Image (cartoon, grey):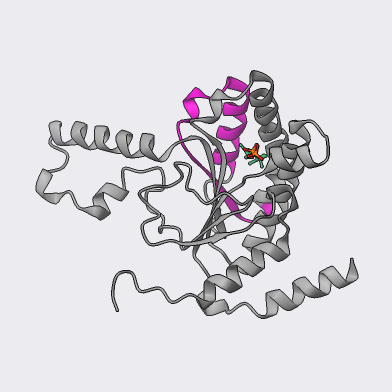
Amino acid sequence: MQNRRKAIEELKNSIDKDKLPLHVAIIMDGNGRWTKQRFMPRSAGHKEGMERVKEIVESASNIGVKYLSLYAFSTENWKRPKEEIDGLMKLLVYYLRVELNNLNKNNIKINTLGDISKLPVGPRREVEKAVELTKNNNKMVLNIALNYGGRNEILKGIKSILNDIEKGKINIEDLDESVFSDYLYTSGQPDPDLLIRPSGELRLSNFLLYQIAYTEFWFSNIYWPDFREEHFLKAIIDYQKRERRFGGI
Ligand code: FPP
């Protein structure tokens, strides 16, 4: 344990504070496979995954990341068995009940990505309460993606733009990438600098499709319940070694 703390401190010290990713996005994957290895029910993997959410949120905020986006529930996750969906919703409520005061005290602003109107009423109210309570916080924005899908977000944006054009609120000629960004759930936020996906899968799974154009990817075979602060810090250190050219030379 002491050795682990020491290793974490060393990793923290090797992070270049001037080259921190402003926005980190994470696809929290592998909860199911983690439980399969241990002959446990899938719910145990999500529960352990929630512990990692607490750990990584705290670490990100401590090192100075300004936006952290976590993919908690996708538009496709409704296809899962009802029991698993209910379990995930319960975990969300539990997380917010246990952590909200702490998050608020640490000046973290909770924001949602996705259509939360489709969530069951209990979890939705809990999320709305958290968003309202933390709305003036400014140390870090914690985006929790709930009923989120990248394609859905882009379509929703297009529909809103068409509506605003019809109402004369904007002109087609004024529509550019920056205006379009304002119609997304991440309106006003910088695009992710770094996307982390544990569990060995090498895909985006409909996460932040528009925003991720120049994001650096970091993949790992570790399952999310095993993804600890040291892995997060290593991802940041690796990111800092990348040369980002944004299409230039
Ligand atoms: C993917 O693993 C994970 C999810 C669909 C849910 C992520 C949720 C949590 C980490 C828990 C709570 C979150 C919050 C914000 C409190 P999977 O089940 O697809 O894993 P598998 O691919 O190995 O089956």
The quadrant in which the C terminus is found is bottom left
The quadrant in which the N terminus is found is bottom right
Residue 44 drawn above or below residue 103: above
Residue 12 drawn above or below residue 209: below
Q: Residue at x 75, y 39 (%)?
A: 45
Q: Camera-side residue: 32 or 75?
A: 32
Residue 210 appears at what percent x and percent y? 35, 49
Q: Camera-side residue: 74 or 40?
A: 40
Q: Residue at x 69, y 54 (%)?
A: 222
Within the displayed image, which quadrant is ligand 1 positioned in? top right
Residue 8 appears at what percent x and percent y? 76, 71
Residue 115 appears at what percent x and percent y? 45, 31
Instruction: Decide whether residue 109 is among the magenta residues.
Output: yes
Judged left or right of residue 230, residue 2 is right
Instruction: Check the image and name the residue furthest to the right.
Output: 2
Judged left or right of residue 54, residue 80 is left
Residue 178 drawn above or below residue 130: below
Q: Residue at x 52, y 77 (%)?
A: 241
Residue 234 drawn above or below residue 189: below
Number of residue marks:
0
Q: Residue at x 57, y 77 (%)?
A: 17
Within the image, what quadrant is residue 34 found in?
top right
Instruction: Decide whether residue 5 is among the magenta residues.
Output: no
Residue 157 appears at what percent x and percent y? 30, 38
Q: Which residues are magenta?
A: 105-133
Within the image, what quadrant is residue 178 found in?
bottom left
